[in-house]
Image: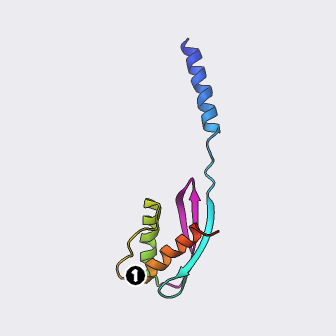
Amino acid sequence: MKYIICLALAVILIFACASLKTGNADFYEGSAMGYRGMIHVRVGIENGAITEITVIESSEDLAIGGAAIEELTDLVMMYNTTEIDAVSGATETSRGFLEAVENAIFSP
């Protein structure tokens, strides 16, 4: 009897694992004006969650703007939203980055 139950559970587990998605994200691109110029991003979305954000092009300086973009990237992916406060000292860069992400997500 235990053998039959174990076999049945093994078959169910195999079919359950086979039906799972392999994790293919859809990618979208968006742009917006930052402090020093355009910020162009690529956003990966999988199962309704933001899984990846890559800055394709940016004119922002690395010390202030780049640091703000890194921090915002982590926060957007952690909270799965662009409704995040701007980084102090890099307000325009923050707004531009978040707007670029929104433009990517909501692009037609």
What is the tally of numbered marks visible in this picture? Answer: 1
Residue in view at x 54 percent, y 14 percent: 2
Q: Main secondary structure of the magenta part?
A: strand
- The verdict on residue 40 being magenta is yes
Above-or-below relation of 28 to 32? above
User: Disc 1 marks which residue?
Assistant: 90
Q: What quarter of the picture does the N terminus occupy? A: top right
Q: Residue at x 44, y 83 (%)?
A: 92
Name the kind of residue labelled 1 in the image. Ala
Query: In the rendered view of the protein, which quadrant contains the C terminus?
Result: bottom right
Q: In which quarter of the image is residue 70?
A: bottom left
Q: Can residue 90 be seen in this view?
A: yes
Can you name the residue that lies furthest to the top here? 1
Range drawn in magenta: 39-60
Label 1 Cα neighbours within 10 Å, binned few <14 / some 14-19 / many ≥20: some
Q: Is the residue 82 above or below the residue 90 in the image?
A: above
The image quarter in which residue 87 lies:
bottom left
Whether the magenta-drawn stretch holds residue 57 is answered as yes
**Above/below status of 63 relative to 19:** below
Quick one: 107 or 30, which is closer to the camera?
A: 107
Secondary structure under the numbered disc 1 in the rendered image: loop
Residue 57, percent across and down? 58, 79
Q: Nearer the viewer, residue 28 or 10?
A: 28
The x and y percentages for residue 81 are 46, 64
| Residue at horizontal 53 percent and vertical 71 percent from the top | 101
The picture places residue 7, in percent across and down from the top left corner, at: 60, 21
Q: Which residue is drawn at 62% across and 67% down?
A: 28
Q: Left or right? Give the position of 67 relative to 102.
A: left
